Amino acid sequence: MNNPVISAELSLHSFYIFNSAFGPKEGEEEKKVLFYHPQDTDIDTKIKDVGLSEAIIKFSNTFTKDDSVQTMHTQKTCQFYFQPEPGYWMIMTLNVPFERKTRESGDYNEYHGDTIHDTIFQSVLRQSYRMFRMFHGTFQDNLRPNEELDAQTNLIGQLEAFYQIYILHLQMKKCDVVDAFGSVQYLPLNQLLFLRVQNFINMIEATFAPIKHCIFLYSDQVVWSGLNPTDLYTLYEYFHSPMYDHFAKTKTVHPTYVTEKGKIKRYSLMVCRKVQNISLCLLLDDEAVQNEQSLYLELNAVVNPQLTSISSDISQHLQTSGETNYSFGCSGSKEDSATAPKFIYFNEMNLQHRGTVRLGPQQYQSMAGSGLPNDVMNLIVDLLDDVRSNRSNVMDETIVKTHDDYWIVKRSCNSRHVFIILNKSSTLIDVTEDTKKILDQNIKGIFF
């Protein structure tokens, strides 16, 4: 009888935030710790982990001058570093997945550290800061006293209130190239429908003075946005996370901080969702809103009839144009098979992606075989990193073959990238021909 295989998946070991300036003297080390997960960790362990991180940062600074330490790998863990603001460090430590194996000398753990891609999880850590800043402002902004708490205690309270919930919903094993891209999906419409949506946005902004920016989503794809691409991605992630359901129960309007012309500005976020398949997200002038509930009810009375009509027209357009399965890897389509050719298109200029590969949580909700192996995902990110480190306006192409007969073709130019994934035993000539067919069918007229 075979013994069951003992293994452990990728998981979060610890997540903490510290500032060395808060405990500069011996005996004050505890003051440096602003947040630590797991919460039930004893204080000695917290102090020891922060001290080790400080030592690693200081050691790395002997070779560089810009606090550029980002990752440290050991056999059992992988640690990511990020300094979002001067003096504030965020550290995320992951447990490396392993399998328990047997040999003549006894049992041992075989660790798979190569499955953890630095770029993907460094992006996850950076996104955790952007999400906090989106709804609470910067760390420094929160370092101020109120009527009941001193400055540092107030900051610690804000960090705990946010990250205790945020970390519960982090699903490390579902992180993939979308986290590295930091991108969203846009819904393509014909000119008439797009102009209709734009006119609708202009109408409500002119009718309701407090409205300053709008985001218009249809079936979780972006049709219109008045935000910069990075803030749009953060809000998009928020709308599709359990955090939205948690916070939406408590308030109709939430304070929101977005970047405009290099400065952070505060707005109030109001979400009208869902009118059929449409979600309308509004950023309101924080000082102009006097009665939130009255404005919400008035808005719904005005926009709901029009949104119902627009939703019906968009649905009809997608059905007649055959684009109902526009999103990544639509269930039941021929692209869902494991061996079907797939592609991912990514535009760094507006942080847009599209294609026929299920990514993120979608790949875990799909039929078996419709996603991509972890090593192929990591290889795609490697190719993207290579492009980012060698910026050039010249078009370049890279073709890679994996040991299990996956072919990956990457073409890039002007911050636009397409990745073709083929899963078959082929010659280089066959791969080139298949690539040309996919580009002609899906990416024609963009830049190739």
Image (spheres, rainbow, N blue to C red):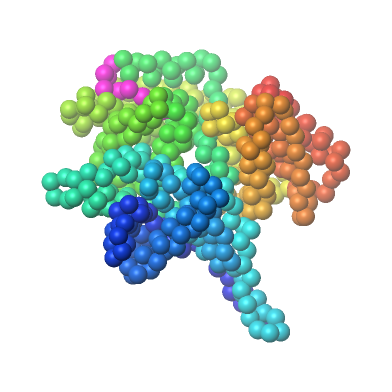
Q: Is residue 412 magenta?
A: no
Q: Main secondary structure of the magenta part?
A: strand
User: Where does the magenta region start and end?
Assistant: 207-216
Q: How far from the left and from the top, in percent, is residue 340?
A: 72, 44
Q: Is residue 182 above or below residue 224?
A: below
Q: Quadrant of the N terminus?
A: bottom right
Place residue 408 in its image quadrant: top right
Q: How far from the left and from the top, in percent, is residue 131?
A: 39, 43
In the image, taking residue 293 as reference, residue 81 lies left or right, namely: right
Q: Quadrant of the C terminus?
A: top right
Q: How far from the left and from the top, in percent, is residue 359?
A: 57, 45
Q: Is residue 210 magenta?
A: yes
Q: Is residue 109 above or below residue 147?
A: below
Q: Is residue 256 above or below residue 125?
A: above
In the image, taking residue 180 as reference, residue 36 lies left or right, namely: left
Q: How far from the left and from the top, in percent, is residue 230?
A: 46, 34
The extreme left residue here reads 147
In the image, taking residue 55 as reference, residue 384 lies left or right, namely: right
Q: Inspect this view and state whether residue 134 appears.
A: yes
**Number of numbered labels in the structure image:** 0
Q: Which residue is nearer to you in this view: 50 or 306?
A: 50
In the image, taking residue 356 as reference, residue 167 lies left or right, namely: left
Place residue 383 in its image quadrant: top right
Place residue 312 in its image quadrant: top left
